[in-house]
Every structure is written in structure tokens, then in C-alpha cells.
Image (cartoon, rainbow, N blue to C red):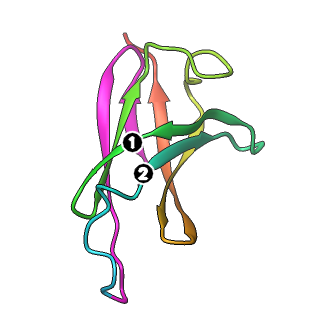
Amino acid sequence: MAIKLTQGTKEIIPVDVVDTSGVVTDLSTATPKFWFQRADESYVYDNVAASAVGMRINCLVDTSASGPDGLLPTDELLRLFVGFTNGSEVIKLGPVGVYMVNTP
């Protein structure tokens, strides 16, 4: 199921991360980032800073602001990825589907 966002809003998309090995328990100092990717694999937002509390990465998405290709495209399924650094590992997780809708 995709997350639906309305264009013109500022919203936090929370992404919960589970470390099945139990080694990582807090991502707040792991330099979390997020990306929005189109179906053609081009990026709308690329390597944007996020915040984290515990194992939840919070992606603040400003749908009224421009990304590299302008406003987030409407009526298009975007793929949200999150990532962070853990020691020498550079982790990228996803995708989570995000669908942008026009305001009425």
C-alpha cells in the first residue's frame, strides 16, 4: 500500500527500521537520509537529510518546494528510500511507495 501525500503540504513520513541482528538500536547519530526516485530511476529528491529517534527515520517532505526536477510529480508513484551510515556500512533501504495527489 502506497503512502498518499497532498501537494502543497509539509509532512513527516516516518519509516521504522528493524535490525534483525539486534546490533543497531538507535539511528539518531547515523546520519539518516532519504531519496525519492521515479519509475525511470531519476531522482526527484536525492540524499536529503532526515532525522531519527530510536529506530524511526523521520523524512520531512515539503511538497510545496522544488526538488531537482521541480515540484514532486502528481499522479505518479514515487519510490521512497531511506539510508544511514553504520560504521563502515552505508545502508540504503526501501522502496516505500509514495503517491502525490493534487489539491482540489
Q: Amino acid at mark 2?
A: Pro
* Whether residue 29 is situated above or below residue 26 in the rendered picture: above
* Whether residue 101 is situated above or below residue 93 in the rendered picture: above
Q: Residue at x 49, y 45 (%)?
A: 34
Q: Return the x and y of residue 83 as percentages of the image width and height.
A: 50, 57
Looking at the image, which residue sits at the far left?
Answer: 54
* Label 1 residue SS: loop
Q: Residue at x 26, y 66 (%)?
A: 26
Q: Return the x and y of residue 40 as percentages of the image width and height.
A: 78, 42
Q: Return the x and y of residue 104 as percentages of the image width and height.
A: 37, 10
Quadrant of res 63: top left
Was residue 87 drawn as part of the magenta stretch in this picture?
no
Which residue lies under the disc numbered 1? 50
Was residue 14 drawn as part of the magenta stretch in this picture?
yes
Quadrant where the N terminus sits is bottom left
Looking at the image, which residue sits at the far bottom?
Answer: 21
Q: Amino acid at mark 1?
A: Ala
Inter-mark Cα distance, 2 to 1: 5 Å
Chain part drawn in magenta: 1-21
Which residue lies under the disc numbered 2? 32
Q: Is residue 89 left or right of residue 20?
A: right
Q: Is residue 92 left or right of residue 6?
A: right
Mark 2–mark 1 contact, CB under 8 Å?
Answer: yes
Looking at the image, which residue sits at the far front?
Answer: 87
